[in-house]
Image: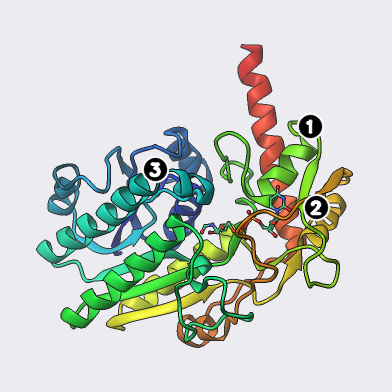
Amino acid sequence: METVLLTGGMGYIGSHTAVELLKEGYEVIIADDLSNSSADVLDRIYAITGTKPRFYQVNAADKAQMEPIFKDYPISAVIHFAGFKAVGESVVKPLMYYRNNLDSALTVLELMAKYDVQRFIFSSSATVYGEKNTPPMTEEMPTGGITNPYGWTKYMIEEILKDAAKADQELSVVLLRYFNPIGADESGLIGEKPNGIPNNLMPYIAQVAAGIRDHLNVFGNDYPTPDGTGIRDYIHVTDLARGHVAALRYSRTHAGAEAINLGTGHGVSVLELVHAFEKASGITIPYVIAPRRAGDIPEMYADVSKAERLLHWHAEKSIEDCCRDSWNFQKHAADELRVMRSK
Ligand code: WQD
């Protein structure tokens, strides 16, 4: 079976993709510097799948650290998750974001060329659609007009990959544009564990439910949407991970660079997500209406026809599944913390 290298594979999306790849029988190697994840994720992947992937604690941008992996294993493809991803932090520390995210991609691509690895699956983002496009987003839309350095790094790496695929006819590149990943593996063992105060909506709601946060701030209810709150395309992280497996299969027989949306095709508002979570958890989520957040757009959801056509993949889990699994992960995390503190 093929050997796949996951850079940043200990993170939220990466670890779920490792699980789905292992379930499909792939050999999985993870390279991660643990700057936004922890080593115990490896044991959790093992607990879920019965297999522990080979793990290298390395910085994907560091060629000396990364080259031995390419030397030692017959890598068939790379799925590149490694990169900083906090929108707000990227505004404050743009040079760190450009250096880290671009160097990581360039280092991996140079090693792939040297060791004749021809398939690259890139963790891109719907953020590349910027503010000018109106939903549903299609892959043919122009990208750019982005409001933060993090989003620009995704845009720039997409452009690098398109040029690389033009120069090397054998290179196969799939640019997976994630919409809003939420939820957790059904085991409750892996999920989204943001450092500090969550920026994203779902982990914040889960922490309110767990009593870690007092209430949710709803960033604006005066948007031109049915209930006035922001609309997004929330996709279960396990569906997203399975989209990567489908993209990997696709890359075996397709050269060139192809952008593909990974979403559900449905928009859900902030208040609809709050109510779905309350229904799934049985817990009331207190919230207050707060001012709009700078940079937020009213509505963003995917046209998912290309993923269906090229990858024969579509999201299967419901928003209720997402909320149930998010809450299950949050409860697992709280139980583990209690056990740790009791020792
Ligand atoms: C969703 C909705 C907020 C928090 C971000 C990144 C994007 C991608 C996914 C990486 C919006 C509202 C949020 C809160 C709220 N990440 N909200 N109260 O902004 O769509 O996308 O994550 O690729 O790049 O920008 O996700 O979860 O932050 O916000 O009302 O405490 O929830 O206004 O309408 P977003 P989000």
Q: Residue at x 69, y 28 (%)?
A: 335
| Element under disc 3 | loop
Mark 2 neighbour class, 10 Å CA radius: few under 14, some 14 to 19, many 20 or more: many
Instruction: Kindly identify the residue that appears in the image at 59 percent across and 76 percent down.
Output: 314
160 or 90, which is in the foreground?
90
**Residue 331 visible in the displayed image:** yes
* Residue on which the image places disc 3: 52
Q: Nearer the viewer, mark 3 or mark 2?
A: 2
| Residue under the image location 51 percent in, 51 percent down | 87
Q: Which mark is residue 277?
A: 2
Asked if residue 29 can be seen in this view, the reply is no
Q: Cα distance, mark 2 to mark 1?
A: 14 Å
Q: In the rendered view, does 331 fall on the left or right side of 45? A: right
- Residue 256 percent location from the top left of the image: 28, 82
Quadrant location of the N terminus in the rendered image:
bottom left
What's the distance in space between the residues labelled 3 and 2, CA to CA? Answer: 32 Å
Mark 1 beta carbon near ligand 1 (under 8 Å): no
User: Which percent across, then down, holds residue 232?
Assistant: 68, 66
Q: Earlier in the sequence, mark 3 or mark 2?
A: 3
Q: Which mark is residue 211?
A: 1
Say which residue appears at 24% left-offset and 77% top-offset. 163
Q: Pointers 1 and 3 in contact (CB under 8 A)?
A: no
Relative image position of residue 28 (x, y in whole percent):
34, 53
> Could you say whether the residue bearing mark 1 is in a helix, strand or loop?
loop
Task: Report how far apart the C-alphas of labels 1 and 3 lie in the structure.
Answer: 34 Å
Tell me the amino acid under the disc marked 2: Phe
> In this rendering, is residue 265 above or below 67?
below
